Amino acid sequence: MTGKPLVLVTGLGGRIGAAIREAMGADYTLVGFELRCAEGDEHCIETDITSAEALERSCAELRRRYGSRIASVIHLAAFYDFSGRDDPKYDEVNVRGTQRLLQALQGFAVEQFVYASTMLVHAPGAPGRPIDEDWPLEPKWPYPKSKLAAERVVRGHRGAIPALILRIAGVYTDDCEVPSLAYQIQRIFERQLESRVFPGDPTHGQAFVHLDDLAQAFRLAVERRGALPPEATLLIGEPGTESYEALQEQIGCLVHGEAWRTHPIPETVAKAGSWLQHQAVKVIPDFIDRGIEPFIQPFMIPLADDHYELDISRARRLLSWEPRHSLRASLPRMIERMKHAPYAWYRRNKIPTPQWLEQAADVERPAGDLVQRAWDLAEERHRRTLWCHFANCALGLWLVCAPFAFGVADARIVASDVLAGAAIAVLALVSLSRDAGWARWAIAGIGIWLLFAPLVFWTTSPAVYANDTLVGALVMLFAVAVPGAPGVSPTARAAGPDVPPGWDFNPSAWIQRVPIIALAFIGLFFSRYLAAYQLGHIESAWDPFFGDGTERVITSEVSEAFPIPDAGLGAVVYVLEIVTGVIGDRRRWRTMPWMSLGFGVLIVPLGAVSIFFIIIQPIVIGTWCALCILGAAAMLVQIPYAFDELLATLQFLKDRAKKGRNLWYVFWRGDTIEGGREAPDDFERPPLAVVRDMVQGGVTLPWTLAASIAIGVALMLSRLLFDAAGTAANNDHLIGALVITVSAIALAEMARPLRYVNVLFGAWLLAAPWLLAGYTASGAWASVVAGLALIVLALPRGPIHSRYGAWDRMIR
């Protein structure tokens, strides 16, 4: 017992309860009724207001410790959630729990009962028309409905206990801690699309009150308990209400230094979008930043138009209460705390942290600085490359006009170009917004269609084919390559090494990609020429070595089995290689893993397919195609140059998986990584040094592999050199092509162990003359010699000049 008046608070351990303790603890004895008391809290009694027996025991303990006189009971405990569902706990806790508490208190001398209700029991008002305590009551969802029902319980079951009902506005602190406002800030901070739209009148808004001012209102209510009416209801909130639009602009300026424009959208569109978000989380949770349901629930959308502006004259008169804070004045401090320590701010506001913010926790620099640097980098690049979107708009308009300028009669081509061009022009204008990354990817998708359209429709117009190919490639480059691909994690963009840990060069550097892009151009030229013949744009296909071999191959049953010209398909692949080779910065092995792996998939498996078609030409078709061979050679040489970036990306993903990262998210958005180092600009050295690194970056030409390739070429020519025929000739051709392929790939230092496969080929060549028909005497000896040579040549490793992290133990 103490001489201080006793104040019983249900929910004293909560946020509002803690503020009341801070405001009143020096002058009152505050005792809490809690479901679970904190260890060591001597002024806490465990109780459960859903049980009359538990309340009776708790009240007996209260009387034993503190006596039967209570200056005030402040009832804060309540059930609340954002699901919008009519949970039974609303009635059990909020309504019947209040009734049980009042009944249990009847045996005490209680001077006052203060019930914490909500302003949402009222019907919404309109701007310029503040609501007062006599405003019509019209709660719209289960929580305020339960609060209004509990108010009626207070009036009906208080007995002789004076009762004060406080209808409270949204309660915020210097860290925010009011969900609707916190998520509004979060959406703008993360530049989410939802932050730009609002399913209601943005000139409407909600009233708020600072937690410290609310605690002061409770203190004044207790202090003036003897002067208050037996029953009274007061609205507690700031008299000025900021509109949603005004908050958007202020938050945008504080977070990103720009006014945040808000566009009203129909309620039906908002509901559909909310439904789709929730379905997407269920279907592909790991692809969503958090993998949980979004904050905005469908039931909230009709409430977005509600406006609450409060008349607090009764609180001024009865309590002499006036808020000392305002939301507009508190926002700068609130946003500064969020920007300084976003991870802690998210946790404090119970907002699931996006995975890029989880990533930032591993970076030495403060997360707030890191995120701001990421936004600044993205903003600077966007400003410098705005011309790309204007260029795409012009290309789209040209595409609309092109069919008519070329005199195209095919309605399918006309419709394709006109629709694609119009879409590109519109999406390019949308892309002028920095946050419209989706529009840029949509343009890239249309660009891919333009590569295929002339082939799908078998256009007879060379101009259309050339135009669609060129425009398709350019719009992809201007949408997602030159301006930088959207979607990279802020952490990946702003922090992390250029060179992977344990490596001594950057596998995504431009000098590593230029050889691949150059070889892709060579392959493109050959493929486009062959596709022109297949489409009938030229009358004949030139072949420097095999007469009509090229024409026979590209009009064979194998080629015509494809629904589109197969040479044209090859041209599309080469264009995509060029474009994907350009997309991404010099750290894309960790900033865009999906692009690095996609680039490798275009090269390595499709390179193997090209080799397969070269193998079957003399075996299945009975002739050769010189230009096909040259194109396949260009594809084959790309493979060793592509391996290092593939390896670095896979090592990175493996490391992130070990660190417990969401691998699916990292695959699409990137991440940082510990270790590694920064590297100087690729082209800051003498020209010859740059060219040397382009040719030798991760690739060397040991004489043993060069000799193996020469043996493979000789085997493919065994028909000419050794008069091989039938099965023997086909065997030599097949093994020779495979030896060339394996040896060429093994030129990559990190793929050097692959040379041992030549031992198997060599062993087969030793046995082949005794197992297969068609060998001449010289051909048989040549097969044996070639087999022995391949086995011997596969043993030396050859020079390894670079380091590849953990992979070194596989090749050294």
Image (cartoon, grey):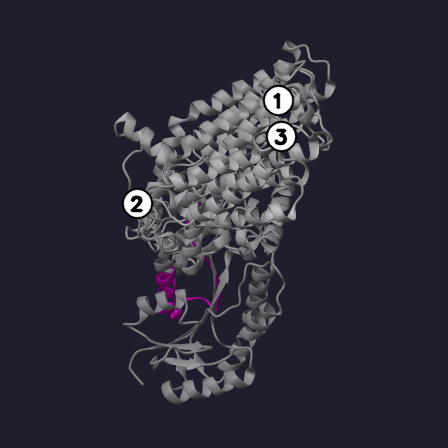
Identify the residue under disc 1: 546
- Secondary element under disc 1, as helix, strand or loop, is loop
Compared with residue 762, is residue 46 higher up or lower down, i.e. above or below? below
On residue 504, the disc is: 2
CB-based contact (under 8 Å), mark 1 and mark 2: no
Q: Based on the picture, tell me whether residue 228 belongs to the magenta stretch.
A: yes
Tell me where the magenta segment starts and ends, as one range: 214-241
Q: How many marks are shown on the rendered structure?
A: 3
First along the sequence among labels 1 and 2: 2
Q: Is residue 668 visible?
A: yes
Observer-nearest of 626 and 779: 779
Query: Farthest residue toward the bottom?
Result: 64
Compared with residue 154, is residue 400 higher up or lower down, i.e. above or below? above
Amino acid type assigned to the residue bearing label 2 in the image:
Asp
Observer-nearest of 19 and 381: 381
Pointer 1 local density, CA inside 10 Å: few below 14, some 14–19, many at least 20? few
Res 777 quadrant in image? top right
Pointer 3 local density, CA inside 10 Å: few below 14, some 14–19, many at least 20? some
Taking the spot 52% from the left edge, 84% from the top edge, the residue there is: 54
Observer-nearest of 11 and 587: 587
Mark 3–mark 2 distance (CA, rounded to whole Å): 37 Å
Taking the spot 58% from the left edge, 51% from the top edge, the residue there is: 300
CB-based contact (under 8 Å), mark 3 and mark 2: no
Taking the spot 58% from the left edge, 21% from the top edge, the residue there is: 545
On residue 569, the disc is: 3
Pointer 2 local density, CA inside 10 Å: few below 14, some 14–19, many at least 20? some
Mark 1–mark 3 distance (CA, rounded to whole Å): 23 Å
Q: In this image, 767 relative to 386: left or right?
A: right
Q: Based on the picture, tell me whether residue 811 belongs to the magenta stretch.
A: no
